[in-house]
């Protein structure tokens, strides 16, 4: 219940709707609610695109680089 309350208090309208409808699991919505509202909506859009709230949240919080950036750098020679 604490997580749902956090989303209701801090979440964007879109994030709250996604949680209420069951589209977004409460635990991921609660973590995303800590982000600025514009970033919450970007997280939600990304989660929908890739079908993975965890990966989208990791990208939004910097725990994981966006696809295509994970292995960039100089090639080993």
Image (spheres, rainbow, N blue to C red):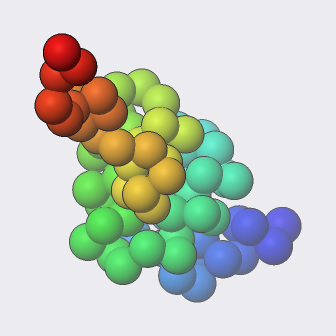
Residue 40 picture location, percent across and down: 37, 64
Q: Is residue 73 above or below residue 27?
A: above
**Exactly how many numbered labels are in the figure?**
0
Residue 30 picture location, percent across and down: 62, 64
Q: Is residue 75 above or below residue 1?
A: above
Residue 36 picture location, percent across and down: 36, 79
Q: Is residue 49 visible?
A: no
Q: Which residue is at a point 39% across and 48% down the rendered structure image?
A: 59
Q: Which residue is at a point 32% across and 33% down the rendered structure image?
A: 70
Q: Quadrant of residue 71?
A: top left
Q: Quadrant of residue 54?
A: top right
* Left or right of 25 on screen, residue 36: left
In which quadrant is the C terminus drawn? top left
* Left or right of 23 on screen, residue 69: left
User: In the current view of this chain or complex, which residue is farthest to the right?
Assistant: 1
Q: Nearer the viewer, residue 59 or 77?
A: 77
User: In the current view of this chain or complex, which residue is farthest to the front?
Assistant: 77
User: In the current view of this chain or complex, which residue is farthest to the bottom?
Assistant: 9
* Left or right of 35 on screen, residue 8: right
Q: Is residue 2 visible?
A: yes
Q: Is residue 71 above or below residue 69?
A: above
Residue 66 picture location, percent across and down: 29, 40
In which quadrant is the N terminus drawn? bottom right
Q: Nearer the viewer, residue 7 or 60?
A: 60
């Amino acid at each position: 219940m604490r997580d749902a309350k956090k989303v209701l208090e801090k979440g964007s309208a879109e994030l709250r709707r996604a949680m209420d409808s069951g589209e977004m699991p409460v635990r991921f919505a609660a973590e995303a609610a800590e982000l600025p509202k514009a970033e919450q909506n970007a997280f939600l859009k990304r989660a929908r695109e890739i079908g993975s709230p965890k990966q989208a949240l990791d990208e939004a919080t910097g725990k994981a680089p966006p696809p295509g950036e994970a292995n960039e750098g100089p090639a080993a020679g």
